[in-house]
Image: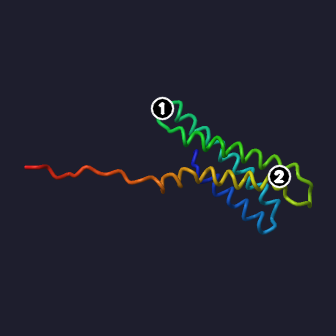
Amino acid sequence: MGSRLLPLFLAIGALLADATGLHHVALYLVLLAVVGAAAAAFVGVGDLLEGTGGLVRAGTTATALALLVLGSAVRANATVGGHVPTLAVSAVVAAVIVYSLPLVGWLLEPLAPRASSAHPS
């Protein structure tokens, strides 16, 4: 448990549900994403404290968890039948972006030069 992909895909599913007008389904998807994000954040911070994980993973998972909690709280307090608050959607979009930051950093990381394996004779 603690995969970053589960809350990421649930948050993307919530955004797609909002786009199609299924706001009630989106609420439950965001609530499920909070549970997955909490597990990922606990694993990320625990690994950082043990010295086996990185600061980026711990920071991004904790930040995404906070954004998903904010989005679900605003969404849950919205009026029934009304529009979804902009803050709720923006928080979920920001959580998806935060989850994607390590991927972007990995893609933009320059290739490290490799030492040649040939030994001079």
Between 93 and 3, the one nearer to me in the picture: 93
Query: In the displayed structure, would residue 99 be above or below residue 12?
Result: above
Q: Residue at x 52, y 36 (%)?
A: 47
Which quadrant of the figure has residue 57?
top right
Residue, x 72% and y 46% (percent of image)? 67
Q: Where is residue 17 shown, x and y percent of the image?
A: 75, 64
Q: Residue at left 69%, top 56%?
A: 11
Horizontal side of 33 relative to 20 (left or right) equals left
Q: Nearer the viewer, residue 67 or 45?
A: 67
Residue 50 pos. (x, y %): 50, 30
Mark 2 / mark 1, whichever is N-terminal: 1
| Residue receiving disc 1 | 51
Q: Which of the image's four quarters has the N terminus?
A: top right
- Evaluate if marks 2 and 1 touch, with contact meaning CB atoms under 8 Å apart: no
Q: Residues within 10 Å of mark 1 (few under 14, many from 20)?
A: few
Q: How was the colour assigned to the protein in this rendering?
A: rainbow
Q: Amino acid at mark 2?
A: Arg
Query: In this image, 22 relative to 10: left or right?
Result: right
Q: Looking at this rendering, what residue extends furthest in the left direction? A: 121
Quadrant in the picture for residue 23: bottom right
Horizontally, residue 38 falls left or right of residue 79, namely left
Q: Which corner quadrant of the image does residue 55 belong to?
A: top right
**Residue closest to the eye, 25 or 91:** 91
Q: CA distance from mark 2 to mark 1?
A: 37 Å
Q: Could you tell whether 121 is left or right of 88 in the image?
A: left
Percent coordinates x, y for residue 81 in the rendering: 92, 61
Amino acid type of disc 1? Gly
Give the residue at mark 2.
75
Determine the secondary structure under disc 2. helix
Q: Secondary structure at mark 1?
A: loop
On the image, the x and y values in percent for residue 83 come to 88, 60
